[in-house]
Amino acid sequence: MVSPFSFKFVLILINDNFMFEALVITPVKDSPDTTLETIRSVYSSDVKVKHIIYNDFSTDETKDILNANKERYRFELINLKDVTTTPSPNYRLVLNMAREKALEMELPLIIVESDVEVKKDTLSNLIQLSRTNKKCGMVGAVTTDKNGQVNFPYLNFRNEKRPIVDTSHSLSFCCTLLSPELLKNFSFDELSEEKHWYDVFISRKSKQLGFRNYLAMNLPVVHKPHSSRPWKQLKYTNPIKYYFLKFIKKRDRI
């Protein structure tokens, strides 16, 4: 016989899940300082979200920091070392796992990368925009530096005056929502195992499927580019070495 306490506990769990407005994921590869800044900012959001951290073979130090903070900031921690033996980066695996979870929960999927800080109303506004803009496949928040200047990867939009842009340009996954309709219509099993990053491909696929992609210029988030992959800073300081690592060592395949 089920006790009244057990029944009440089950109801609490059901209601708790029902109250989530989105599934938020953050893939993590070290950079614990920026990762914690990301986690804190998501936790401080004005909307209730399910937050999952995918730890992609970070150092034990980073893993310990994540374990020490998961109860405080109420995120679920998945260590990919327990799931796969494939070395980092495992973005394809993360996206497939996240899509399955989002579909199960019937929620939009929001990717907030570990070098991004969202504002209190960023996530709630992304959700609202996805619901009110026609045939939304993706909606991204524009990235800026700490001084509010538009930065990588949205430099092409730095002179844009419109608050919301219906764009054919690819959206970055820095802080981007993928609508439930897009998730239902596009299986991430199609993503190439030869690539490392998929924002360009998924942006294009969204358009091919008849969806619209939006960039919210009025929802800036702070972006600290390449904090988890410092070798990519070579693109600006030593481009010859950067492209050697990219093409000869087959890093950063897009």
Image: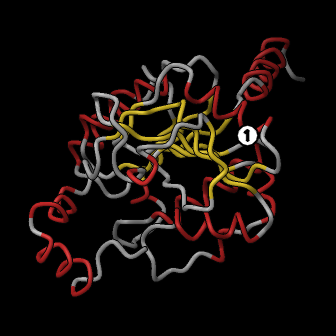
Q: Position of residue 231 (x, y in %)?
A: 17, 62
Q: Give me the residue at 67% from left, 55% from top.
A: 99
Helix, strand or loop at label 1? It is helix
Where is residue 140? Give x, y as percent.
57, 45
Local crowd size for mark 1, using a 10 Å CA cut-off: few (<14), some (14–19), many (≥20):
many
**In the image, 191: left or right of 39?**
right
Seen at 20% across and 78% down, the residue is 243
The correct choice, above or below, for 2 with respect to 111 in the image is: above
Q: Amino acid at mark 1?
A: Ser
Total count of labels = 1
- Left or right, 177 with respect to 198, comes to right
The way the protein has been coloured in the rendering is secondary structure
> Residue 177 location in percent, x, y?
62, 45
**Residue 17 sits above or below residue 130 on the image:** above
Q: Is residue 18 above or below residue 66?
A: above
**Which residue shows up at 10% across the image and 61% down it?**
237
Side of 29 where 102 appears, left or right: right
Classify 226 as above or below 66: below
- For mark 1, what is the residue? 130
In depth, the one of 217 and 30 nearer the eye is 217
Q: Where, quadrant-wise, is the N terminus in this rendering?
A: top right
Residue shown at 65% from the left, 74% from the top: 189
Residue 97 placement: quadrant: bottom right
Quadrant containing the C terminus is: bottom left
Q: In this rendered view, identify the residue nearer to me: 27 or 176.
A: 176
Q: Quadrant of residue 19?
A: top right
Horizontal and vertical percent for residue 20? Answer: 71, 28
Q: List the single residue furthest toward the right.
A: 1
Which residue extends farthest bottom?
248
